[in-house]
Amino acid sequence: MESFHLWTIGCQMNKADSQRLGSALEQLGLREVETAGEADLVVLNSCVVRQQAEDKVVGHLTWMKPWKSNEPGRVVALMGCMVGAKTDDLARRFPFVDVFMRPQQYGPLLDLVGERVGLDWEGCVGALAPAQPDVTCYVPIIHGCDLMCTFCIIPYRRGRQVSRPVGEVVREVELLVHRGVKEVTVLGQTVDAYGLDLPEKPDLADLLTQLNGVDGLERIRFLTSHPSFFTGEIIRAVADLPKVCEHINLPVQAGDDDVLKAMRRPYTRQEFIDLVGRIRDNIPHSSLATDIIVGFPGETEEQYERTVDLIAELRPDKVHCAAYSSRPGTVAGRTMEDEVSKDEKARRRVRLEELQEGILTEINSALVGQKVDILVEGRRDGKWHGRTRSDKLVFFQSEDEHLGELVNLDITRSSPWSLQGELTQQYVHLHP
Ligand code: SF4
């Protein structure tokens, strides 16, 4: 066995898990390849948060069947949220899959690969941080979630919250910086609940303070926050620590109290508005992203309108809007009728997206003429791109090498989804 291909779908946690598994496989001597066709091992890292994601995984698995039967020595592994505690049903549906692994459960595959290549992986695999990371890198700091939102399958698949100790996270970030990383995004399903399960009870503010002291690290981001855990200490840490970016990802999910209750989100619409007010009062220039689910079981037109009003009032910088999708095994999937029609859900989603587009057109056009700093993450279609501290995507043209640089730009053009800029005189002065 010489090569592997990793196919990943879903959230940033899945992307981070794939990076870490890829690092372990490379430490066992395997080489990552671009396509499944060239690989000896294919890992599908799955997501079942929505039916659409699960359908894509099943589509890939269907494609893997002849791939495997043409050369039975090849290995197929299915990882991620599609894999529950019991795998009998999956094994019956997909008998050609060699290994099933729950999220972060790398052992079964590493055992198999270790056997094939004649190595004891526990002796060979060290830190799971990516060996050749990009300029920006995800660092999981919490696995699992202790909440039980009625629509969500994640606690059943990723288990209860387990935070990594502060020292372990800091050492991993130092290693990543040594390997060229300039920005880390620390990840958790409820990242602001970080540390509540640890004996010393450090919180996210403590961790951000420690990470702010890592030499060579330029920026720190964190996601996803939960409104119930976003304390004054965290707000102060974001306001005071120079490396922590002022971008808050805070899903509200709905703007109506009865829908929030049915979702088992433990806050009210007003409490969310007050929290956003505290964030904006204390963190100048902060940007806000949120998630909305439309068409939750029983959501009336009136209740939906309250969500629309909330978005119009708060004017977030990003709204990730999804139509409710019933997931077997969740509380809502077991006990609630998925009664809002598909067409109606689509209408509600599209209307919210149109509202968001209008808000973003205004917010972004106000940035034209301003100067911003971005961290350059890569090059696409002949232009460099990176993000502002507030998470705005900006493109600029230059023939020079800029990967990993913090550059200062004049914003010249805007659209709802990105900005265009030019290097400023300040930049030219600093980089003669
Ligand atoms: S907070 Fe709710 S939506 Fe987020 S992972 Fe936990 S259960 Fe799922």
Image (tube, helix red, strand yellow):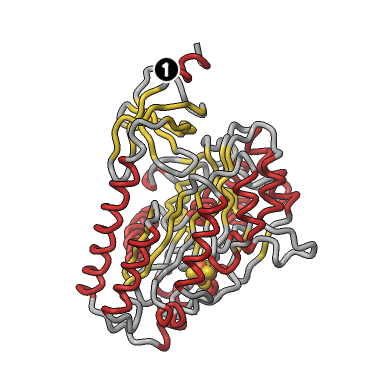
Work out whether residue 124 can be spotted: no
Q: Amino acid at mark 1?
A: Asp
- Picture residue at 25% right of the left edge, 69% below the top: 348
Kindly indicate the quadrant of the structure image that contains residue 422.
top left
In terms of secondary structure, where does tag 1 sit? loop
Q: Is residue 198 above or below residue 418?
A: below
- Picture residue at 46% right of the left edge, 23% below the top: 402
35 on left or right of 349: right
Work out whether residue 429 can be spotted: yes
Kindly indicate the quadrant of the structure image that contains residue 417.
top left
- Picture residue at 32% right of the left edge, 26% below the top: 382
Q: Is residue 155 above or below residue 286?
A: below
From this viewpoint, which residue is outermost toward the right?
Answer: 200
Q: Is residue 15 above or below residue 108?
A: above
68 on left or right of 184: left
- Picture residue at 43% right of the left edge, 55% below the top: 289
